[in-house]
Image (cartoon, coloured by chain):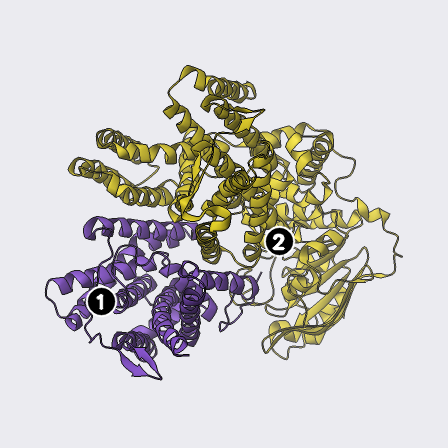
Chain colours: A yellow, B purple
Amino acid sequence: MMKSRPLLLAAAGLVVLALFPVLIENPYYIHLVETISIYAILLFGLDIVVGYTGQVSLGHAGLFGIGAYSAGVVIMHFPDTPFVLVPIIAIAVTALFGAVLALPALRVTGPYLAMVTLAFGTIIQILINEMDFLTNGPMGITLSKPIVLGHEMSDREFFWVVAFLLVAALLVVNRILRSHLGRAFEALRGSPVASDCMGVSVYRYKVYAFVVSAGLAGLAGSLYSYSEQYISPNTYDFELTVLFLLAIIMGGRKTRSGALLGATIIVMLPKLLDDIVLFRYVAVIFAALVLIGAAIFVAKGRSTLQRVAVPVVGTVALAGVSFVLTNITDWRLAIFGLITLLVVYYLQDGIVGFVRSTLGLHGHGRTDAEAAALLPSPVDAVSTSVAATATPAMQDLVAADKVLMQFGGLKALNDVDLHVSRGTIHGLIGPNGSGKSTMMNVLTGIYVPTGGAIAFKGHSIVGKTSARIALAGIARTFQNVQLFGEMTALQNVLVGLHHTYRSNLLDVALHLPRYRREERAAMARAYALLEFVGLESLAGEEARNLPYGQQRLLEIARALALSPELLLLDEPAAGLTAPDIKELVVIIRKIREHGITLILIEHHMDVVMSVCDIVTVLDFGQKIAEGTPAAVQANPQVIKAYLGGELTAPTLPAAAAPQGGARIGSGSDPSSPGSLG
Amino acid sequence: MQILTQLVFSGIALGMIYAVIAFGYQLTFATSDTLNFGQGEALMLGALVGLTLVGMGVNYWLMIPIVCVFGAIQGAVVERIGVRPALKIKSEFGWIMSTIALGIIFRNVAENVWGRDMRPFPSPLPEAPLHFLGANVRPMEILVAVGAILMMAAVELFNRRTIWGKAVVATFNDREAARLMGINTSLVITFSYALSSISAALAGVLIAPLTLAGPNMAAQLGLKAFAVAIIGGLTSGMGIIVGGIILGVAEKLTGFYISTGYSDVPGLVLLLIVLAVRPAGLFGKATIKKV
């Protein structure tokens, strides 16, 4: 029932799309739906960048232009090129430009990236205008509908071509975004640092996202030039780019239906604004809808009067103004601007997102989780590659010597040696700001140490990227939780399992056996990992909605998905309740039983003392003690570092308390600002 | 040689305008990590309001403070409508889109109020050029450069010497801490937007006599000024003046020696290169990311 309804809807949609040009003979309407389809193809791609990876791109009108002109230029200069080749060339050229555009995107985000992409779009427009010899400059290019086997396609036939490509693009994009590739894109948005530390290279997947997105823009552009039969540089301007973004946010990001809806809106809206009488009707209906919606929301207590005041007043004012104005066309852009403002603040999840949340519908995240629960569980989800390693048991898994990490004049780590033996739980303690987390960041490649040597399994890891270090077998959790908030618990773990996939784009797009096999195996293992930390009942829940303690457990499950040989836990017990801590200690012991070596940073001394085999104490970036928990506890220097005085008490009071959960060190709040520790 | 000197001088005048707009970016970026993507439109509105005032018979010099008041109001409106709600929900996408949207609205309104045509702006100084180093320099070009530097100096002095300025600097350093110290940070942010738009509006009435005034006079200005802000670094005062001059001169040279059609290109390419190679700018300090 649940599965058949969308299928039925899709089949109905296909039939309507196929019969449309037969039933409606007016070429104007055929062209209108064709334009919507073309825009939708571009928006699928834009949504990958904007919705999934969370980057603002103001360059997609430029990419669209490149696609259109690739087709136009090829046809102008080589009129005999077969039609089939033209979109392929356009896709290839535009994808190449997408890769170029991604280069600065690797270094910058947010407003910087917005400006960079805007600059890119502007340069493209200038180049199209100025390079007359190639593009015919401001005169534009006139072309015919595609000619296949000596026959020029009719409007209707070309409509079917576009419709077919729309459906194909929809299917492929949908498959990509629901695969490990899509999860990688989404992970970038959730937490770039965590992505890198899960072996999902932020660099690589940003480039992928831009390339795929640009390829779709290229396809859309080439179809557009055939559809319009005339292209000129000024089409691909700033306004078009803003219009595309408006379509994505208004329709609803991260949904294909949102892109389709958004495309329809931005194509229909200008037509609507051409007709003042029609616009008045629509404005009044729109205002009434918003008014009713707001009234329901306020009555149900889901919103307050102040919150709904602006959209209500805004839409009513718009309706009022529409009766004053005689010529609405001149105000077209201002109206677009107003709509954008309203959408950005009052319809953040778009129309599709709004409808979904009002109706209580869920995305595929939850159904996937239910499906995963039914899969047969793997033999052992936790330990995999560990047993296969041939290194002698006695050799240090980690050998860090004289590690120096300097930030300006501050030595966060000052000639620290850290040797971790295979199969042990190695505690790393010290007051806040002593350099513990810096050590974690150095070990995982987030910081490149200023000096010293670090070897993992006998190979140096200094200067290697976080993603490579992660794939080499070091996994970690974060002091301030770094989950992919909008993804479900299961999907978070699946990102950790990214390294188990060998499937490429083609496998994913066609759902070839290799991809299906890998996806099934990963699903089963991810679910088993959730069971390992006791979160299987929450598999379908978005990570941001989990309670804090369970977020920390989820981070552990995600880290285990990497099949690490070394697991770094950065204050896993911070903010946990006493029963949760007990559970955590059990999990830590279980992880060790699977042959995984652990480094544990923790302020809860009872946890450290009960599970660690050996403890290293840092203070002001220097190692002040190392030894068994008992020896360290008795060390006068350690006591001095923690309590600050010349105390000679034999043991730390809190450490002596068996299960108190008491913490040593002042202000050991994990989120305390300014602490490097 | 004479032509070259000539181009360099007009390049400097243009570059100073870029510097002023970039300065506006710095002001708001300092207090709230946001910037107005419609900064070019703020300049355009300043110029057109100035033109209307001059047309009504107001003296050029008297018109400037009125335009400043207008700029302040415009900037405050942008902050209230476009930026504050986004800061509240911590949405970067939100303020980028809403300042773009406001820019589009402003431009469209200007088109409907003043018409789409570019109009000449009467120059307050004599048009006869001065001769300097063998080149002709228009007095207005000197005024642009002097006015731009004076304005930036005034704001710097304000920041360093007054308690209000210290509040701005404190908000820049740590918004949360400044708020806890009793500084009304949201007012400071509004204020920085007002100041930012004032500088843009002022730049508008300074540059308009040299170019023309019209709704589309600022089409690429905001973007190129961002290039200047990036080249100079978003935190360096000296950097934007150097960056502005580099860009202004590069543009004039490209326009003359290659083609006016390409004159926008060097700035944009420079922006792409600087961001790809050294995102903190030539003069800015690189920051360490913390995890």
| Quadrant, the N terminus of chain A | top right
Classify residue B145 by image quadrant: bottom left
Give the letter of the chain under mark 2: A
Whole-Å distance between the Cαs marked 1 and 2?
A: 45 Å
Q: Nearer the viewer, residue B72 or B53?
A: B53
Give the letter of the chain under mark 1: B
- On screen, residue A501 versus residue A574, left or right, reads right
Name the residue: 64% across, 51% down: A204
| Quadrant, the C terminus of chain A | bottom right
Instruction: Inspect this view and state whether residue A56 appears.
Output: no
User: What percent of the width, then of the height, locates residue A229?
Assistant: 44, 34
Name the residue: 67% across, 27% down: A374
Instruction: Inspect this view and state whether residue A480 appears.
Output: yes
- On screen, residue A274 versus residue A383, left or right, reads left
Classify residue A456 by image quadrant: bottom right
Q: Secondary structure at mark 1?
A: helix
- On screen, residue A173 versus residue B11, left or right, reads right
Amino acid on which disc 2 is placed:
Tyr
The residue beneath circle 2 is A203
The residue beneath circle 1 is B68
User: What percent of the width, then of the height, locates residue A221?
Assistant: 49, 39
- On screen, residue B228 versus residue B47, left or right, reads right
Which label sits on residue B33? none
User: What percent of the width, then of the height, locates residue B102?
Assistant: 31, 51
Q: With respect to residue B40, does B148 lie above or below?
A: below
Residue placed furthest toward the top: A23
Residue placed furthest toward the left: B57
Q: Do marks 1 and 2 both belong to one polypeptide chain? A: no
Amino acid on which disc 1 is placed:
Cys
